[in-house]
Image (spheres, rainbow, N blue to C red):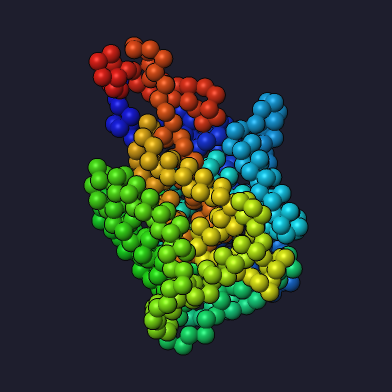
Amino acid sequence: MPSSAENAGAPIASDVAGNIDSRLLGALFAAAAVCYLGVYALEAPIRYVLYNAGKDNLILLRDGFIVGPLALLIAAYALRLRLHAAVVVFGMLVVFHGLVLMGTIGSALAVGYGIKIVINLLFGFFIASLLLQPGNKVLTFLALIWCITILGVCLDKFVMTFPWTGIKTIVGDLNVDVSHDWEIQDPLARRVAGFTRSSISVAAFMPSLAIVLMSRTRRWLLRAFIMMGSVGVVALTTQKGSIIAFAPIAAVLCLPSAYRLKLLRFGCIAFIVAAVALPFLVMNLHMAHGTGVFSTESIYLRIAYTWPLAWQWIMHHGMLLFGVGLGGIGGPMRVYAPDNFNPADNVFLLLYAYFGVFAFLYLILIAYLVLRRVTGSQERAVTATAIVAFIFGYGGVVSIIEDQSAALFLGAALGVLWRETIPVIVPSRWAPVMRRDAAGDNVRPIGVATPAFGRLR
């Protein structure tokens, strides 16, 4: 029997449904994901149409692509008098950290806002390999979104100013900027968003999308083309943090397969450590800076204002070791503390405000998944590790978990790593080597253990 390494790219029994044990529900999740990402990639013109029709709140219907399939999945499990372990764990954590926010802030609406942010992680966990190693139809759709996003950014940068640039809409009683106009006259320095809502949306979405496309591409020339196109379009948005995080990851994906996983693991852990350490290391740091989008002014503003004020907010409103609670900083503050709004601009600060000391535990668990031995498809593990590395690399200067696409891709990456690193069970010296299925209830053979070395053959 071929080894797991030899079968790295081959589909296995339940991979057709990601981490879902139903082909039908798996297909529904895949369709919902591509529709959701399609709306995300075209959010600016969609919001503009709704704005002109006076129906701004209808944009919230996009969340039905996330909530609807999850509700059906939970109902399907409930009819069998069981719940998926991921749903149980997610529900318990949401309730606990939500109650913390009720104790510190007392806003149920803010808890709902926080759930809206993190629920994409759960959806992504279930869709897993359906998004990170999609079939041909989904892959074609993702490639089309990639092309449309590049076209939109290039048109916005060099050809025209879109009619939705700078509009302000009200969604759920909250003010929302679309393609924020930064009032920069230099066309080469002007921040653009194309068809997405903001330049940060492009900077968070394109690298994750490019990683998926590059991982499914066998020809290195095409990989290099996707890499250069993606790095180029992110450069047009002037989001420096995304470029710094994505460029080395994309370069690793262009290397021979034997080097990718080790280098990506190293980079992933380095980015996680950097994201955690950065707000601590720069306390009371004073630095010279220039002006403009390509200067160090943006990082200076984080060091001098955003991060100190975020620490102050957390210390003044946190509950013991539990942080402020789910929704304790960033976007949800628009609901309960608009005058003190702080974007955090660091993924660790966001997690610490949400979860307190539990943030360290969750980050350790992510690092453990990244480093755990691969027992399934190494190809899928490489894609997942690359996405986790990018998320935390860019997360050093942006609260990237608040971005819907980033949370979706991160959940999918963690779902893949969980599945592809499930420990092997060897009942006896000559028994088949088994791996647990997506639900963790059954086992399936993946090889035969030899008496001498216990290796697969």
Where 287 sits versus 38, above or below? Answer: below
How many tags in the picture?
A: 0
Q: In which quadrant of the rendered view does residue 4 lie?
A: top left
- Between 139 and 65, the residue placed more toward the observer is 65
Give the residue at the far bottom of this rendering.
185
Which percent across, then down, holds residue 403? 55, 60
Q: In which quadrant of the rendered view does residue 186 lie?
A: bottom left
Q: Classify the position of the N terminus by image quarter.
A: top left
Where 275 sits versus 289, above or below? Answer: above
Q: Which residue lies at the image location 56% right of the left edge and 55% below the top edge?
A: 352
Work out whether residue 33 can be spotted: no
Q: Which residue lies at the image location 51% right of the left edge and 31% below the top edge?
A: 438
In the image, taking residue 13 as reference, residue 1 lies left or right, namely left
Which percent across, then down, holds residue 47? 63, 68
Q: Which residue lies at the image location 74% right of the left edge and 72% below the top edge?
A: 54
Work out whether residue 430 can be spotted: yes
Q: Classify the position of the C terminus by image quarter.
A: top left
Which percent across, then down, holds residue 450? 28, 16
- Between 83 and 178, the residue placed more toward the observer is 83
Q: Which residue lies at the image location 70% right of the left edge and 54% below the top edge?
A: 101
Which percent across, then down, holds residue 175? 68, 72
Where 281 sits versus 222, above or below? Answer: below
In the image, taking residue 37 as reference, residue 237 lies left or right, namely left
